[in-house]
Image (cartoon, rainbow, N blue to C red):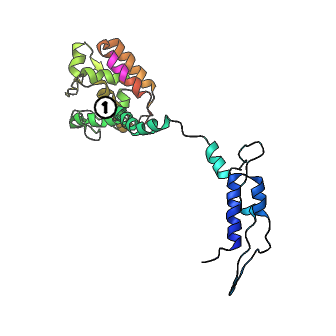
């Protein structure tokens, strides 16, 4: 039968005494023994560990459990703020909200071209008579080399001439046009009335002719002069011209 080393017996007794809480038994189990080690062939039995390291902490005299310190990382985990319960449904709804928001956005509208751009397009109808570069042809007067600005230094007078044309002037009993008092139809050429043009087209083509062919430096007060003419002689188109002219007055001169 194999003999159990004394230090193991003593450790077992100390463990049982610690579990029972009997102070007398603990003291007896912790007392040193005369035969603390047992010699064996080729080795020495280790001395039994002290009760200080093997026996767990006992309760205090009042029976309260021992005050075991809490590790810092455990204390931090217990004391940190928890995620509010309402965050989870909010995060789950975010993709849905993004889709709804994207669908409610207005699509960007294409920006309308400015007066010079619209005028360049509208002038294609005039090029057959006045030439692509404003040089005129035959009985049709030229618009370049200062001729246009010489006949119509006031833009409102040109607007009226373009709107009514030769026949419109004759019907109104107006014998001449422009500041040089050229006779209506005197050269044999007929200026058609362009009342069918929209306000944007008409003002645009006149801006094109005066700026591109006449080299005129644009002044926003020209729009005010056009509006005064329309209000006075073409009141049925006042609102149409006002909308266009007020919008274009906000644009830079080169627009």
Residue at 75% across / 57% down in the picture?
25
Tell me the SS state at disc 1: helix
x then y, percent, for residue 27: 79, 59
x then y, percent, for residue 123: 27, 35
Q: Looking at the image, can residue 135 be seen?
A: yes
Relative to 127, is 180 on the left or the right? right
Q: Which residues are magenta?
A: 238-243
Q: Nearer the viewer, residue 177 or 225?
A: 225
Residue at 60% across / 40% down in the picture?
81
Question: What secondary structure is the magenta-colored segment mainly?
Answer: helix
Relative to 255, is 190 on the left or the right? left
Pointer 1 residue: 205
Q: Quadrant of the N terminus?
A: bottom right
Q: Looking at the image, can residue 184 be seen?
A: no
Occupied quadrant, residue 146: top left
Occupied quadrant, residue 205: top left
Q: Nearer the viewer, residue 148 or 199?
A: 199
Relative to 168, is 119 on the left or the right? right
């Amino acid at each position: 039968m194999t003999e159990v080393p004394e230090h193991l017996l003593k450790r077992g007794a100390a463990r049982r005494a610690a579990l029972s809480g009997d102070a007398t038994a603990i003291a007896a189990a912790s007392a040193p023994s005369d035969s603390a080690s047992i010699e064996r062939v080729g080795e020495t039995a280790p001395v039994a560990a002290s009760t200080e390291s093997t026996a767990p902490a006992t309760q205090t005299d009042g029976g309260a459990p021992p005050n075991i310190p809490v590790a810092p990382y455990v204390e931090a985990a217990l004391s940190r703020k928890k995620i509010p319960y309402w965050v989870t449904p909010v995060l789950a709804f975010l993709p849905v909200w993004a889709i709804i928001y994207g669908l409610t956005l207005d699509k960007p509208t294409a920006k309308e071209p400015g007066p010079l751009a619209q005028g360049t397009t509208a002038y294609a109808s005039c090029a057959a008579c006045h030439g692509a570069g404003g040089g005129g042809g035959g009985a049709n007067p030229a618009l370049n080399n200062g001729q246009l600005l010489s006949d119509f230094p006031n833009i409102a007078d040109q607007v009226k001439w373009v709107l009514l044309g030769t026949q419109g002037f004759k019907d109104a009993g107006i014998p001449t046009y422009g500041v040089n008092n050229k006779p209506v139809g005197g050269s044999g050429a007929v200026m058609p009335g362009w009342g069918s043009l929209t306000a944007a087209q008409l003002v645009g083509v006149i801006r094109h002719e005066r700026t591109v062919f006449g080299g005129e430096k644009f002044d926003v007060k020209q729009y005010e002069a056009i509006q005064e003419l329309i209000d006075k002689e073409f009141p049925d188109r006042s609102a149409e011209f006002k909308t266009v002219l007020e919008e274009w007055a906000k644009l830079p001169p080169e627009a």
